[in-house]
Image (spheres, helix red, strand yellow):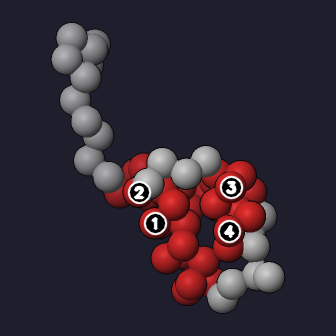
Amino acid sequence: MKQSEEQARKTVAAAYANGVPVRQAAELCGWSVGWVSTRYQELRDATPARSLEGAAQ
């Protein structure tokens, strides 16, 4: 069953925070893998990047 967009965004945010794969998050909320993938990208963009020691800047 497809969740409302508001609920799906909450589900996807929780899935992302817990390291759930995109495909599984899509199954949980009922939205497409593409839609969930876009939400994951938004969450990645909103999260400060962890600095990688020794990585080229």
Report whether residue 10 is seen. Answer: yes
Q: What is the secondary structure assignment of the residue under circle 4?
A: helix
Q: Quadrant of the N terminus?
A: bottom right
Q: Residues within 10 Å of mark 1 (few under 14, many from 20)?
A: few
Q: Is residue 44 above or below residue 26?
A: above
Is residue 19 rendered to the left or right of residue 21? left
Q: Tell me whether the residue at label 2 lies in contact with that at label 3, contact meaning CB atoms closer than 8 angstroms.
A: no
Task: Name the residue located 47 percent from the left edge and 66 percent from the top edge.
Answer: 13
Q: What is the secondary structure assignment of the residue under circle 3?
A: helix
Q: Amino acid at mark 3?
A: Gln
Image quarter of residue 54: top left
Q: Tell me whether the residue at label 3 lies in contact with that at label 4, contact meaning CB atoms closer than 8 angstroms.
A: yes
Q: Tell me whether the residue at label 1 lies in contact with that at label 2, contact meaning CB atoms closer than 8 angstroms.
A: yes
Q: Amino acid at mark 2?
A: Ala
- Indicate the position of residue 2 as horizontal and vertical percent values: 76, 81
Circle 1 is placed at which residue position?
14
- Label 4 to label 1: alpha-carbon separation: 11 Å
Task: Name the residue located 56 percent from the left edge and 84 percent from the top edge.
Answer: 7
- Indicate the position of residue 16 as horizontal and vertical percent values: 48, 56
Q: Amino acid at mark 4?
A: Leu
Q: Quadrant of the C terminus?
A: top left
- Indicate the position of residue 14 as horizontal and vertical percent values: 46, 66
Can you tell which mark lies on residue 17? 2
Task: Name the residue located 74 percent from the left edge and 64 percent from the top edge.
Answer: 27
Circle 4 is placed at which residue position?
28
- Indicate the position of residue 30 as horizontal and vertical percent values: 75, 73
Circle 3 is placed at which residue position?
24
Q: Residues within 10 Å of mark 3 (few under 14, many from 20)?
A: some
Q: What is the secondary structure assignment of the residue under circle 1?
A: helix
